[in-house]
Amino acid sequence: MGLDIRWPIGLMFSLIGALLTGYGAITGSDLDMYKRSLDININLRWGLVLLVFGLLMLILAWRGKSQGQPDEAKPAATTPEK
């Protein structure tokens, strides 16, 4: 098979996590915005969770590729018949 599903999942979660973390960091000083969530900067926290998960998927995909999976396109070596 060609594409490891961990690549697109890792890229998507990393991108969304980075955007959400950035938004949470920028709006962290706005206390009125987070009154409804018990003064918890939920954008920053979930952004970090998504970013860590995305990076973990990318690391696992990279490690899976570097270990060298067997190539299915190559025919198996056969012994000559007598």
Image (cartoon, rainbow, N blue to C red):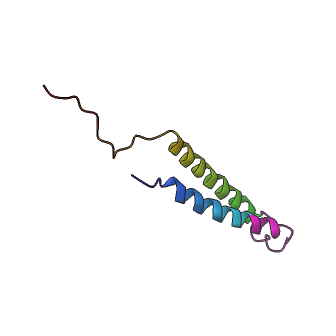
Q: Position of residue 12 (x, y in %)?
A: 58, 63
State which quadrant residue 80 falls in.
top left
**Which residue ends up furthest to the bottom in the rendered image?**
32
Query: Is residue 4 found left or right of 73 in the rendered image?
Result: right
**Quadrant holding the C terminus:** top left
Looking at the rendering, the stretch of residues picked out in magenta corresponds to 22-40
Query: Is residue 23 found left or right of 68 in the rendered image?
Result: right
- Which residue is rendered at x = 44% and y = 41% of the image? 69
**Which residue ends up furthest to the left in the rendered image?**
82
Q: Position of residue 33 (x, y in %)?
A: 80, 74
Report the predominant secondary structure element of the magenta stretch: loop
Q: Nearer the viewer, residue 14 or 23?
A: 14
Residue 60 is at least partly visible in this image: yes
Q: How many marks on residues?
A: 0
Query: On screen, 2 above or below 78?
Result: below
Q: Is residue 30 magenta?
A: yes
Query: On screen, 29 above or below 68?
Result: below
Q: Nearer the viewer, residue 52 or 79?
A: 79
Q: Nearer the viewer, residue 64 or 47?
A: 64
- Which residue is rendered at x = 53% and y = 42% of the image? 66
Q: Is residue 78 magenta?
A: no
Residue 38 is at least partly visible in this image: no
Q: Position of residue 40 (x, y in %)?
A: 77, 63
- Which residue is rendered at x = 60% and y = 47% of the image? 59
